[in-house]
Image (cartoon, rainbow, N blue to C red):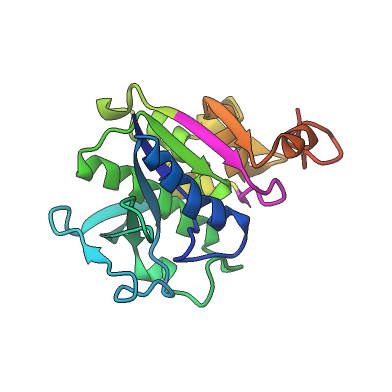
Amino acid sequence: MKVAFVASEVVPFAKTGGLADVAGALPVELKKSGIDIKVFMPKYYSVDENKYNLHYVDFVGEFQVRVGGYPQPINLFSGLLPDSDVEVYFIDAPAYFHRSSIYTNDLDEDERFILFQKAVIEAIQRLGWGPDVIHLNDWQTGLIPLLIRDNYNWDRMFDNTSFMYTIHNIGYQGVFGEDSMRKAEISEHYFTGNHVLEHGGAVNFMKAAILYSDIITTVSSTYAKELMSAEYGAGMHY
């Protein structure tokens, strides 16, 4: 089985919370069980190429990803999770990820992770490695199932790919203005038609992931039960 594990932070490369710990440990255990797994994350300014022995992926080279109709240059680096043979691929886009912190309140925060998600899809295409499962984590990866169904539905590589979405923190859902849909170049139907993207009049990355993933998981059975309640579900309990 081939699994693409996608996360916005991974120990030891970048961490703000528990997501990074899971992303740094779970792929190692899955690899030990015989799963062919690759990890994908942004290449933040704080990721030291020399310290982690990262290498430029020459055979992929520079490619471009469109955000809001404008092409952005992307480069791909690779390394290994410490003390393992789990490959980690880093999406390098300095204009978006070379900032003082992993997450920001900048006006283009939605663009940053739209770019990341599109770049992950296109990196997988260029690697020629069709995953059986794409394991997504939190809102920063939530558009990938929809993007593959909409923007990349021409690519038969993903015809048999399933999507697993893990909610680590329901409090952060990736809520942005309607313009985010256009930046991602997703059909307006998903906002005004079937409302997959729309929640409370805004674009909600997490809602799209919940509705378009095959399996939804959380960090514990207790948290799963809490998320199904109005008190703790943060509007996602319906």
Residue ranking furthest to the left:
59
Q: Is residue 231 above or below residue 12?
A: above
Task: Identify the residue at image location x=48%, y=55%.
Answer: 24
For the N terminus, give its image quadrant. Answer: top left
| Foreground residue among 179 and 29 | 29
Q: Where is residue 91 in the image (x, y as percent from the top left)?
A: 34, 58
Q: In this view, does 150 lie to the left or right of 85?
A: right
* Res 202 quadrant in image: top right
Q: Looking at the picture, how far across and down is residue 20, in whole percent? A: 54, 57
Q: In which quarter of the image is residue 36?
A: top left
Residue 234 falls left or right of residue 195: right
Establish if 224 lies above or below 6.
Answer: above
Question: Magenta residues?
Answer: 163-177
Q: Can residue 68 be seen in this view?
A: no
Q: Is residue 28 above or below residue 223?
A: below
Is residue 84 found left or right of 145 in the rendered image? Answer: left
